Amino acid sequence: MQREGWRFPPERRHVLKDEDRQRRLQPERILDEADVQPGETVVDVGAGPGFWTELLAKRVGPNGHVFAVDVEPVMLDELRTLVEERGLSNVDVVQSEETSIPLEEGIADLILLIFVLHEPPDPMPFLAEIIRLLKPNGRVLVVDWQDWPTEQGPPLEVRISQEEARALLGAAGLSAEVMISPTRDAYVLLAREFRAGELEITEPTV
């Protein structure tokens, strides 16, 4: 469904590595919730300057792989610098379009959508591309801002509530479980494709 999307301004990318932001989000705890395992292939969509990418690279180890994906040239440059400086040999940097990611289908054990779901004006083609990349029994980790005033985050009018996010994921064929969030400013969902016998898919409301 068409809506007003909002993309993070690349000129403010320093905020994405702000120590207070990371303290609030507790990224290691969120990755524990997603059960990131050594040897897995992870796609970090909207990787930005690579904070989550670096954590993922350490978690999946030398037998795993991380694809750090972004649409913004300045973010891609920072990702490449990070990979080179930190020697992240298990990371590939990938330039994408908003609804097209140039990776093979069925490649990902886990896909990260960290403060990304609210960005596309029409989330459904974007989510279809996410599902295309998933392995059978793969999972999607969604972290996004709550739809109430917070110290950080995008304008309230472009945010997607937890309930709306679950409806969107459901309409795309994903069953989303609500996980424990380390901050009241954001919600955490872990989604998998529907299995036989699960609830019928609902239509999104955004």
Image (spheres, rainbow, N blue to C red):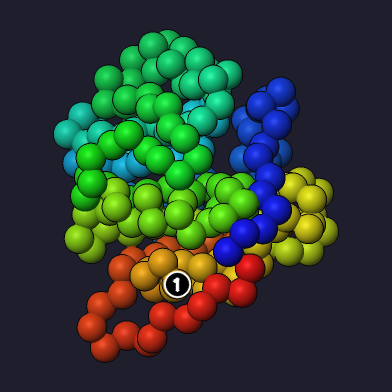
- Kindly tell me whether residue 103 is visible in this rendering: yes
Task: Looking at this view, name the residue that lies furthest to the front.
Answer: 2
* Left or right of residue 185, residue 46 in this image: left
**The C terminus lies in quadrant:** bottom right
Give the camera-side residue of 120 and 111.
Answer: 120
Give the camera-side residue of 30 and 109.
Answer: 109
To which residue does mark 1 refer? 171
**The N terminus lies in quadrant:** bottom right
Residue drawn at the location 33% of the way across and 66% of the way down: 192
Q: Is residue 190 above or below residue 46?
A: below
Residue drawn at the location 51% of the way across and 68% of the way down: 168
Q: Give residue 116's position: percent from left, percent from top.
A: 56, 47
* Left or right of residue 38, residue 190 in this image: right
Q: Is residue 26 above or below residue 178?
A: above
Q: Give residue 191's position: percent from left, percent from top.
A: 39, 65
Give the camera-side residue of 137 and 40.
Answer: 137
Give the camera-side residue of 122 and 17.
Answer: 122
Q: Give residue 165's position: percent from left, percent from top.
A: 56, 66
Q: Give residue 118's position: percent from left, percent from top.
A: 62, 53
Q: Residues within 10 Å of mark 1 (few under 14, many from 20)?
A: some
Residue drawn at the location 39% of the way across and 11% of the way down: 84
| Amino acid on which disc 1 is placed | Ala
Q: Is residue 102 above or below residue 32?
A: above
Residue drawn at the location 73% of the way across and 64% of the way down: 147
